[in-house]
Amino acid sequence: MRTHFTQAQLCDPHLAQVEHNLRACVHCGICTATCPTYVLTGDERDGPRGRIVMMQAMLEQGGAPSPETVHHIDRCLSCLGCKTACPSSVDYARLVDTARAHIETHYRRPLGERMLRIFVAKVTTHPARLRAGLALARVFAPLARRMPGRLGHLARMGASVKPSRTRSEVAPTDAAARVALMPGCAQAALAPQIDAAAARVLARRGIAAVALEGAGCCGALDFHLGREKAAKAWAKRAIEAFERESAKQPFAAVLITATGCAAHLKDYANLFVDEPEWAARAARFAAKVRDFSEVAQPMAASPPRRLRVAYHAACSLQHGMKIAGTGEALIAAAGHDVLAVPEGHLCCGAAGSYAILQPTLSGQLRARKMSNIAGLAADAVAGGNIGCITHLSGPDSPPILHLAELLDWSEGGPKPPGLAG
């Protein structure tokens, strides 16, 4: 593509990255077949190629974008299926992330939408606040069912979620190898048993999972809302915690048991492309980040019963981190039959806060995913991302488990909540 950025604009490292990727795009359209929203709507503006045209015009012109541009960029899931499919190696993430930050700075949303985004940023990133919010949603469930619009959808979602009451303590181990375990945010409120299961799985492999004191949310939720300053604050907190704790005793890796968060952690250096000192520190941190499926090597087990397990590889795993086959190998080694989900490359519609902000499209994608899963007659679905697990769980689904929970149970640990038999 031909671009028209000024030299002054290109002094901004983020816009320089944008221009590089715009120039690489040849508008071949191969990406459209892998874009979940384009597959649903057939609207060119809801596909990567159409969004790229709108983002280029918005960023070159500067100033406030049009409502139409905001509408269609908001509908992007950031699943990055287009990045995987692109024959020209266009890094779509660099484009849409910069576009979202520009929208956050230059566009004034309607009051209700602003309030909803503030809720996502200020509540879901803090486990205690999220637990309190879910408790209130359950108390006011009858009222929530009558509320209109996205606020009503959010209230109904909150009322339907049943957080686990399992304690999340990570048992100490004397293993020589140590990994720093990031506490995260939403998962700590919704399913604290996942980290405990992951720690037991790693302990059997001679690896100690040590809670990274002082770290909190990874910042992905803020980042994908365009809240760059808040995302950087979370990232700096995590990096400083890692540097402080690793100075006492080195860590072999940094681990977080949600693939969406892991993908964001691995991309920290790009977050600080405009801050060289922090970019270097972020790069050192990111080089240590591993997904759970990379750290937990396959180990033979004799599970209480052999299951037919549909493996849901989150977009952040297959398109963000480009990790393939690790989850399937772990499930097979644990003694289960692994089932490939048809259209596994398409997003389930969770996508962080997308299920809250875009409930219609998110619901359509969930229905499509559940239809594909239903045809497998699976005993359970295993995944590695809390957003996908929460989004797919429901009365119409088989038990949805985190990969760590399935492995832990198969190797002698407690039965995961919701697993029948």
Image (tube, helix red, strand yellow):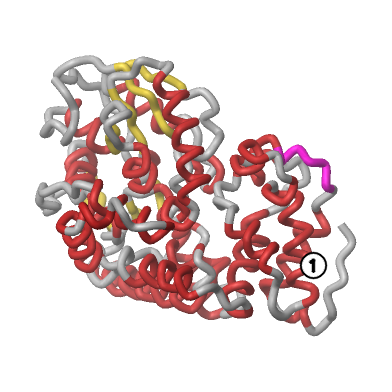
Left or right of 408 on screen, residue 316: right
Residue 73: percent from the left, percent from the top?
Answer: 63, 59
Which residue lies under the disc numbered 1? 57
Farthest-out residue, front: 146
Residue 11: percent from the left, percent from the top?
Answer: 75, 81
Residue 202: percent from the left, percent from the top?
Answer: 23, 42
Left or right of 165 on screen, residue 284: right
Q: Residue at x 29, y 35 (%)?
A: 394
Q: In the picture shown, does residue 316 fall above or below 279?
A: above
The reply to whether residue 55 is in sight is yes
Is disc 1 placed on a helix, strand or loop? helix
Q: Residue at x 25, y 50 (%)?
A: 177
Amino acid beneath label 1: Ala
Q: Residue at x 21, y 38 (%)?
A: 201
Residue 182: percent from the left, percent from the top?
Answer: 30, 59
Q: Nearer the viewer, residue 93 or 377?
A: 377
Left or right of 56 on screen, residue 249: left
The magenta stretch spans which residues?
27-32
Q: In the picture shown, does residue 372 fall above or below 102?
A: above
Quarter holding the C terminus is top left
Tell me where residue 302 sits by quadrant. Answer: top left
Left or right of 253 on screen, residue 48: right
Q: Residues within 10 Å of mark 1 (few under 14, many from 20)?
A: some
Q: Residue at x 24, y 31 (%)?
A: 407
Q: Nearer the viewer, residue 350 or 245?
A: 350
The reply to whether residue 84 is in sight is no
Q: Nearer the viewer, residue 358 or 79?
A: 358
